[in-house]
């Protein structure tokens, strides 16, 4: 298995569409296909003189192209691969603020506001529940309640129903009038959560 970036192999990037990946794959596989290379060298009468190292390099490139395409053409495998790339990125860079567990985060909530008047809804209205962890910049790392509970059950085999607003461990709070869910990247056993104010991230272990 190659250690090279699959997107680099296919001359693409993580934002490339499946059609773009497929087009690049077809072009590259034709270029490096063993039969195509042999035909080229035979036409040039250079087969016997072909450099062995070059031949092996081309053969390996063909294998890498095939491996990359077999992974990225599958939506599930691609999602897992993208998550692993993101995880590697944060592990190898200095923007990881902390590695914590869900128990280290504070579960809190705030009332939903009326979008037209910016006023709090009636007392019996639904609350927005989320987990938060303070960043050194003054911002927060936020995970909405549903995502947090799904993560907990998935990785800890916890089949209990999601908590309700009557739980004693819930703190009242707010997020500056907005509790929009932050971007969360999930990989097996871990979540990567971005700060809502700066470029730092936390790694959340199961």
Image (spheres, rainbow, N blue to C red):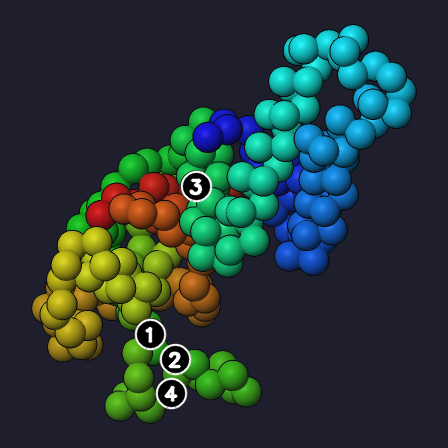
Residue at label 4? 121
| Residue 34: % across, % down | 69, 31
Question: Mark 2 packing: few (<14 Cα in 10 Å), some, or many (20+)?
Answer: some
Are dots 1 and 2 in contact, CB under 8 Å? yes
* Residue 84 marker: 3
Q: In the image, what residue occupies the spot 63% across and 25% down?
A: 59
Instruction: Judge left or right: residue 29 versus residue 184.
Output: right
| Residue 86: % across, % down | 48, 41
Marks 3 and 1, how far apart at CA: 30 Å
Marks 4 and 2, how far apart at CA: 6 Å
* Residue 128 marker: 1
Residue at label 2? 112
Q: In the image, what residue occupies the spot 30% across and 78% down?
A: 127
Question: Mark 1 packing: few (<14 Cα in 10 Å), some, or many (20+)?
Answer: some
| Residue 193 appears anywhere in the view | no
Pointer 3 or 2: first along the chain: 3
Are dots 4 and 2 in contact, CB under 8 Å? yes
């Amino acid at each position: 298995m190659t250690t090279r970036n699959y997107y680099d192999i296919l001359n693409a990037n993580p934002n490339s569409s499946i059609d773009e990946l497929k087009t690049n794959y077809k072009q590259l596989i034709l270029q490096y296909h063993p039969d195509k290379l042999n035909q080229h060298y035979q036409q040039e009468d250079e087969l016997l003189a072909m450099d062995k190292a070059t031949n092996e390099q081309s053969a390996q490139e063909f294998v890498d192209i095939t491996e990359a395409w077999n992974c990225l053409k599958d939506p599930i495998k691609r999602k897992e691969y993208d998550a692993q790339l993101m995880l590697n990125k944060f592990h190898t860079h200095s923007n990881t603020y902390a590695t914590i567990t869900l128990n280290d985060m504070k579960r809190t909530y705030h009332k939903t506001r009326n979008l037209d008047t910016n006023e709090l809804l009636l007392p019996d209205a639904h609350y927005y529940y989320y987990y938060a962890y303070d960043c050194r910049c003054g911002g927060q790392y936020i995970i909405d309640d549903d995502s947090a509970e799904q993560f907990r059950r998935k990785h800890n085999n916890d089949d209990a129903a999601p908590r309700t607003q009557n739980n004693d461990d819930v703190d009242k709070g707010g997020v500056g009038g907005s509790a929009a869910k932050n971007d969360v990247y999930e990989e097996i056993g871990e979540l990567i959560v971005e700060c809502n104010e700066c470029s730092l991230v936390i790694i959340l272990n199961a």
